[in-house]
Amino acid sequence: MERITLILAFLLFWIITPSISQSNCITAFGPIYGQPEVNERSKSILPTPANDGLYLDGMKADSTLIVKMDLNGQVIWSRSFDIIPGAIDNVTSSIIDADGMICTVGIAGDYSNGGNAFAFRYDPNANQVMWAREYVTSTLRTYSFAIVQKPNGNYVIAFNPHTPLPGTTNDDEIFEVNQSNGTIVAGLDFVFDWGGSDATSELVYYQNFIYGVGN
């Protein structure tokens, strides 16, 4: 029997008291969202640009699912897109860019068996996928777990091409993609070989530097 996963969302409000080392953590709401007969998963939670709501970015069956809700946990809209036809849109991470667009990365395929990395840029106000790209490599598995935006508007994506065979390359890679169409910017693709299984799990931009963490 297929295991069904429902989207669970909650807000935590941290109330700090005047006493040192004392605080109260209050759960404002914690309902379960989704349909019991459909496999739905939330992978990212993002504040709206106006800070008046939240976006949940994840999966519904083999497609991408984006849900907008207000600060009281009421669903405003729910939209599903088949970004990569014929493959599972395995969303891993999302950001809100400087223009208020939702930018998402993931794996086009089953997480365990692998697939190609993909990314897309979505306008939630116009309900329009502005571009979607699948990044094809010769390896059996390609993972992507992180994305960050540069001041020039382009995105830097963490990439992990991986062939799960002894003696093969399993290195960390980051590359820059064009904001307007998602194509890889020539000359801005870097591979890091630290001697083991290398992958970046998160990226942040701070004062003209991009920082990353991973394994």
Image: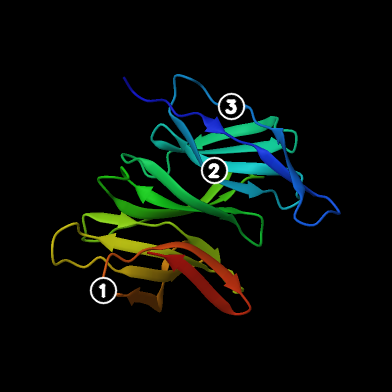
Q: Earlier in the sequence, mark 3 or mark 1?
A: 3
Identify the secondary structure beneath mark 1. Answer: loop
**Foreground label between 1 and 2:** 1
Percent position (x, y) of residue 73? Answer: 70, 33
**Which quadrant is home to the N terminus?**
top left
Identify the secondary structure beneath mark 2. Answer: strand
Identify the secondary structure beneath mark 3. Answer: strand
Q: Which amino acid type is shown beneath numbered disc 3?
A: Ile
Q: Residue at x 76, y 48 (%)?
A: 23
As measured in the structure, the alpha-carbon distance from the residue carrying label 3 to the one carrying label 1 is 43 Å
**Which quadrant is home to the C terminus?**
bottom left
Circle 2: is it few (<14), some (14-19), or many (20+) Cα within 10 Å?
many
Quadrant for residue 10, please give it. Answer: top right
The mark found on residue 32 in the picture is: 3
Query: Left or right: 211 with respect to 2?
Result: right
Q: Residue furthest left?
A: 166
**Foreground label between 2 and 3:** 3
Percent position (x, y) of residue 211? Answer: 52, 72
Q: Nearer the viewer, residue 191 or 22?
A: 22
Query: Left or right: 199 with respect to 8?
Result: left
